[in-house]
Amino acid sequence: MLKYVPDDTSVVFSEIPDQICLAINISGCPHKCLGCHSPYLRDDIGEELTIPVLEKLIKKNQGITCVLFMGGDSDKEYLTALSSYITGFGLLVGWYSGEDYLDLDIYRNHFDYIKVGSYKKEMGPLNCKTTNQRLYRIIDRENIKDITCRFWK
Amino acid sequence: MVQIRKKTGLVQEFNANKIITSIIKSAERVHIDIPPTKTNKVIDLVLEKIRDCEVVDVKELHSLIITALEEVDLSVAQSYCEYSTLSSNQNLSLSEESTEEQFVKNKIAFINKYKQSSNTANSTIDDNSNVSNKNVAILNAEIHKPENIRISRSMVMGKLKELYPDFNSKRYIRDLEDHVIYKHDESSIAGICPYCVSITMYPFLLDGIKGLGGLSASPKNLKSFCGIFCNMVFAISSQFAGALAASETMLYFTYYCKKEWGPDFYLHSDKVVETNYDGKQRTILDEIHQYWQQIIYTINQPAAARGFQSAFVNFSYFDKPFFDGMFGDFCFPDGTQPDWESLKWIQMEFMKWFNAERLKTVLTFPVETVTLLYKDGKFLDEEMAQFVYDEYSRGHSFFTYISDTVDSLSSCCRLKNKLQTKEFNFTSGNIGIQTGSKSVITFNLNRLVQLWYRKEMEKREDSFKFDSSCYPSLKKYLVKLMDRVYKYHHAYNELLWDMYDADLLPAYKAGFIHLNKQYLTLGINGLNQAAEFLGMECNVNDDYAKFCQEIFSLFKEQNELHKDTTSKHHLIFNTEQVPAESLGAKNYNWDKEDGYWVDTDSNLYASYIFKPNNPSLSVLDKIKMHGRDYIGEYLDGGSACHINLDSHLSSEQYKLLLNYAAENGCNYLTFNVPMTECKECGNIVNAPVDKCPKCGCDKMQYYTRIIGYLTAVKNWNSNRQKEFETRMFGDKGTYKTYKAK
């Protein structure tokens, strides 16, 4: 089970290149990155992110091309279940994970975009060339592309 | 209490309320809302001077009021002086000699105020920001505006009496002074003047600008075309209060390029055609860029004949289906026909050049619109559509007009107009392109809805909740005023024809435009606040969608009913959400002062279906709200959707958004990302930044569209600057706001 913060749900353009994303902020983050820009997401706040809730969000935001989970590392299995549901709408699914080591072999079947890496202040976020974080575009099972450089304009 | 000795010798007690009423009336005449703090200050200042007197002469009192008003608001002081002369109120009238003296004194005071003001927009009657510097030419135009308004009103009243002897023509003044309607640009020309226009330039090919009273005959080559084109822009602009669309500019420019370098010039634009004295070689493209520089910098030059405002110039770019529809059977005077490939090349090159040039100087004009045809779920001209996506992603801000037929044209940042005929005519060229708005009268919807509500409350003897059963009654109420507005428009139309018959409108006589091609426009302002007053929220919801549709469809239906295309002088009407650059704040303040409900999270009535400061709307919501569920086909005069962003998107994202707009019937939109200019080194950045990437200084100023056109925020009037600081750039949850200074 995962909870999300309704007030933080928004349509965004800069998180996934070339897509119009509905970003859903998931609370209960298990990571404790120093300098995290939304530390409140570590708390157990917000509302339960159920399939009906998700369906409502998607319908309310018609025009999006991708649903992006910001977090969700505390229940990856549930996240993959939600992801399969979203695919049924013909939408792409992205996941901003805070894990440094994520087995892409498992998750490549469920997501079209995956960001991995905790936030390390000294290395900077995705738009810093020194970042430790990586954004992958999963074209198909065999074809995973590191597109982090798209943030370095 | 101090006693006042009237002209007749009669002595009366000092009456502050009487004075306040006169001041408010004077302020209204010059479209200024004077708050009680200011009127009270005047009374205090006057009382301070006469406190110790027992009896004061009315003449003396009058000068004291004017002197006090000069400290508070010079325009009102000026108007007060003039108004009180006309007023039958003997208490405040002056002898002829001192009226004249006061009149001159006030004009001088106005000049002094203008000298001290921070920018032109803050010190003028029509506080538009299409001017950047203060100077004597602007002052010369501004100083006569109060008289211009009075002359215009008086002429309309005279014509109303003639056309409708049984109608009380004074009602026109009352409706204006009650602020239920507003007549745009009453002050710009003494008397009567058409508003905005989309011309055909065909007469220009045949006869140059001779028909406009100029000296130049038809242009013979590209060089003379560019020169005479600029003269034409100024000559025509000076005879209109608003914008000038020259939608064929690119088409004609291409025609002259072909004359210069052959029909396939664009296929070898790198060919050297000129060599300078120092041996530097110049290609066709270099030459073209130089001509564009000449045209664009010239038209951005403030025009002395327009109160030193630049000519408000619009260019259009077409996709192939639109080109075929508009110009398929078009012939130039030499019998040749335009071809799509060369025009396409010129359009694209111009747009790329203009976008790059804006990094050297933030050029305001032309306001550009690309027209794209969308049918059966796709943009028909994929190449042009792709260019549009790419150009937006390169940071170019322009309007896109999406249509499913070629029978309407959006030639301006504000107006979309149905074209009445597209057939080519050998005497007047492609007459299809001619359209525009002869006159605009805008309804203050917020006030009107509240007046209706009050009336309804009286009937029902209690307050009540608005629901859909109320629409017939609300509409009936609005129709009463609309009936009068059609009369006012009719009168104005006849006055325009009188001007035409007296040979005072040469742009018409010379065939650039025809009075029967232009619309009389009913504007709407205060839509958001009207809905909020009735208990609705201005976001994506069925009640608000219905409200918008009910209101807009009423205008459309009434416009049809009042149309007359059988008489010699046609009457055709359309409706738009007016940009209300300065009117938005005027209406807001008038309503607030007069005790009507206004929202506290705005300081003016914006021109969109959504409120630009609403933090809970996504970009997708905003596009949807300018689509068919809200606007439908009803707002035939247009309503541009401004999507304010904090950074540029990718071409792919613009593609998604434009297709989303097309699918949802949002047919008129633009994307605005503020530009920044470094005050120290002049470096221009096509993004909002707080530090100059070149010199590192933090003295930066923003540029964005105040309404339709791009200018420096520092030149905006203070109401618009305040509004700018609340504009949400970006998306819900991640939006940004910026400071005006």
Image: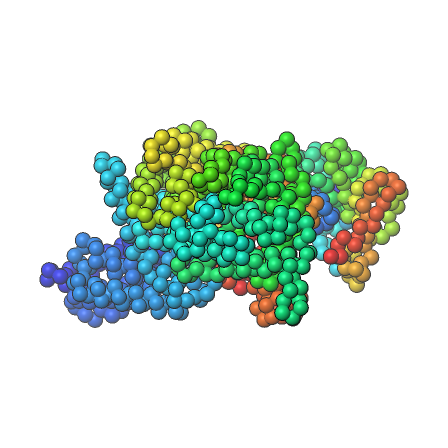
- How many callouts does the rendering have? 0
Q: Position of residue B97 (x, y in %)?
A: 17, 65
Residue drawn at x 64%, y 44% as measured from the top left? B341
Residue B165, picture quadrant: top left
Residue drawn at x 33%, y 32% as measured from the top left? B567
Q: Quadrant of the N terminus of chain B?
A: bottom left
Vertical arrangement, residue A20 with respect to residue B131, above or below: above
Tell me: B519 left or right of B150. Answer: right
Residue drawn at x 28%, y 63% as measured from the top left? B43
Colour pattern: rainbow
Vertical arrangement, residue B275 with respect to residue B366, above or below: below
Among all residues in the image, which is located at the extreme front? B334
Q: Position of residue B175 (x, y in %)?
A: 32, 43
Vertical arrangement, residue B195 with respect to residue A80, above or below: below
Q: Position of residue B629 (x, y in %)?
A: 55, 34
Can residue B589 be seen? no
Tell me: A106 left or right of B740. Answer: right
**Foreground residue among A42 and B446:** B446
Residue B695, picture quadrant: bottom right
Residue drawn at x 59%, y 49% as measured from the top left? B258
Can residue B36 be seen? yes
**Foreground residue among B697 and B507:** B507
Tell me: B432 left or right of B293. Answer: left
Tell me: B313 left or right of B31. Answer: right
Q: Position of residue B641 (x, y in %)?
A: 55, 44
